Image (cartoon, helix red, strand yellow):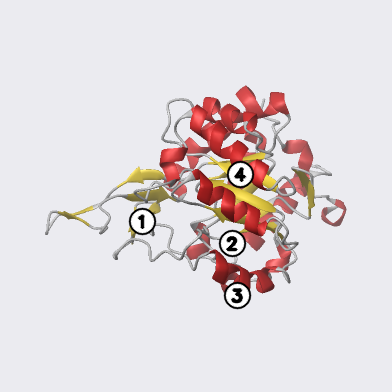
Amino acid sequence: MENKIDISVDFAGLHLANPVFAASGTAGYGDELAEFINISAIGGFITKSITLEPRRGNPPPRAVETDSGMLNAIGLANIGMEKFVTEKLPILSNMKPVVFVNIAGETIEEYAAIAERLCTEKAIAGFELNISCPNVKKGGICFGTEPSVVEQITSTVKKACKKKILMVKLSPAVTDISEIASAAIDGGADAISLINTFTAMAIDIETRRPILANRTGGLSGPAIKPIALYLVHKVYTEVTKKRNIPIMGLGGIRTAADAIEFMIAGATVIAIGTANFVDPDVSIKVIEGIKKYCSRNKITTVREIVGSIL
């Protein structure tokens, strides 16, 4: 029966072979991950963040392993938009999975300028609006905590490029994430991505100094999964189900069971992040695990389980 199972999904107007994405910041620009897995087998791919100008990011050390997770304070280090267009877009154009570009900036105008510049690129299906990075002094999370600002930046970017799908990535560091999700949709978001990392820290007890040079970083990995799952379900039941907007769920997913939990909670697709560092082949294993789950439970299409929590 496994061969008859349909694990394709429809996401914001896209028809995807399966619901599994590689999350932004964990697989570079595609060519890095392609060295380890058959990247054409996954449903979608999200690039690491792109800014108008190249960024060196935060000084090292900027990553540290924690219990059931990791902290990172990369600081949106990237090659900048022009190098992205000349060096990375040709690679992405040959990829089978749909490609979303994660965009970031220090001002609303910078976000819009990137979207406008990339709007005609056929290799790109859409943008993931990064308004939730906790590791930069300007931009990032400062745009993602006030509903009025979220609506404004979403609306501005959408107007700059109406041809592409706009997915807004939400921070968990807010009083009411449903209110932020509603503001993003009011601004024109076609999909919601949640959640980004939690601000956290680790201390070296011998030196009594923070381990990260940035002092704090974003906590990701299995440690945040139960909270991420709850927030996905909250946004689904309170906002997106009523407004017919799909969710990309992420936060600590490393197994097929994790992915299925997020889909039952309301996510149409899921993204795998930190687990890629441990096992680059994890996405393929999750896809196969989803097929086996459906077969075992006599489910003919994976779309049946989205939002099916009892």
Q: Which mark is residue 98?
A: none
Three-letter amino acid code at the position of disc 2: Val
Q: Nearer the viewer, mark 3 or mark 1?
A: 3
Residue 242 is situated, as x and y percent measured from the top left of the image, at 70, 23
Residue 264 is situated, as x and y percent measured from the top left of the image, at 66, 36
Q: Nearer the viewer, mark 2 or mark 4?
A: 4
Depicted 115 relative to depicted 308: above or below: below
Depicted 90 relative to depicted 116: above or below: below
Label 4 belongs to which residue? 157
Residue 286 is situated, as x and y percent measured from the top left of the image, at 64, 56
First-in-chain label (2 vs 4): 4
Three-letter amino acid code at the position of disc 1: Ala
Q: CA distance from mark 3 to mark 2?
A: 27 Å
Q: CA distance from mark 1 to mark 2?
A: 23 Å
Q: Which mark is residue 73?
A: 1
Determine contact: label 3, label 1, CB under 8 Å: no
Q: Nearer the viewer, mark 3 or mark 2?
A: 3
First-in-chain label (3 vs 4): 3
First-in-chain label (3 vs 2): 3
User: How many numbered discs sit on the rendered protein?
Assistant: 4
In this image, 39 relative to 295: left or right?
Answer: left
Pick the front one: 136 or 97: 136
In this image, 180 relative to 295: left or right?
Answer: left
Q: Secondary structure at mark 4?
A: helix
First-in-chain label (4 vs 1): 1
Three-letter amino acid code at the position of disc 4: Val
Quarter of the rendering occupied by the C terminus: top right
Residue 175 is situated, as x and y percent measured from the top left of the image, at 42, 26
Q: CA distance from mark 4 to mark 1?
A: 26 Å
Three-letter amino acid code at the position of disc 3: Glu
Label 2 belongs to which residue? 282
